[in-house]
Image (spheres, rainbow, N blue to C red):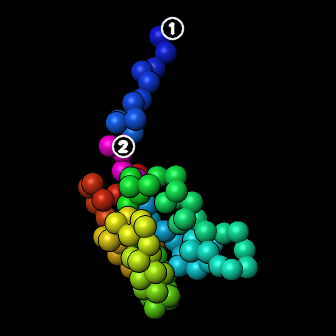
Amino acid sequence: MRSPPKRSADWEMLLNFNVILIGAGEVNFGSVEGPWNHSLRLERKLKDRLQIIALVDPDIDRAKSALESKSKGDQAASYVNARIVSTISEASNLFRGDKQPK
């Protein structure tokens, strides 16, 4: 049995990961009180391949604040096309084709 072909580093860099974040709170964006910060972990792991497609949170102001803080960081390009929506249904209706989460 033949083993699958190895993926080259160049090939890996071609893969973008479209991500929808659910919630603009401390689990996804961190706090001084705890170890949670999923967005930072994704940024470190995926680097330039990370594309945040949407942030879902019923608190639109909190979502705007979270994206504003990310727009000033090293991975700002990952958030430039992020849309803010208040429900998962809204997110599912917005993203088709190459913008679907991968």
Q: Residue at x 57, y 71 (%)?
A: 28
Q: Position of residue 98 (x, y in %)?
A: 27, 54
Is residue 31 part of the magenta span, yes or no?
no
Q: Residue at x 44, y 24 (%)?
A: 6
Q: How far apart in space, not on screen, are marks 2 and 1 (Cα)? A: 28 Å
Q: Is residue 95 visible?
A: yes
Q: Is residue 42 left or right of residue 80?
A: right
Q: Is residue 28 left or right of residue 52?
A: right
Q: Is residue 42 above or below residue 55?
A: above
Callout 2: SS: helix
Q: Residue at x 73, y 79 (%)?
A: 33
Q: Quadrant of residue 89?
A: bottom left
Which amino acid is tagged 2? Met
Q: Residue at x 49, y 60 (%)?
A: 43
Q: Is residue 49 above or below residue 55?
A: above
Give the number of the disc on residue 1.
Answer: 1
Q: Is residue 60 above or below residue 22?
A: below
From the image, tell me which residue sits under label 2: 13
Give the number of callouts.
2
Q: Position of residue 65 (x, y in %)?
A: 46, 86
Is residue 16 part of the magenta span, yes or no?
yes
Magenta part of the protein: which range?
Answer: 13-18
Q: Nearer the viewer, residue 96 or 55?
A: 55
Q: Position of residue 100 (x, y in %)?
A: 34, 57
Q: Position of residue 23 (x, y in %)?
A: 54, 76
Callout 1: SS: loop
Which amino acid is tagged 1? Met
Q: Residue at the far left: name it.
A: 97
Q: Is residue 81 above or below residue 46?
A: below
- The residue mark sitting in front, 2 or 1, is 2
Q: Earlier in the sequence, mark 2 or mark 1?
A: 1
Q: Residue at the far top: name it.
A: 1
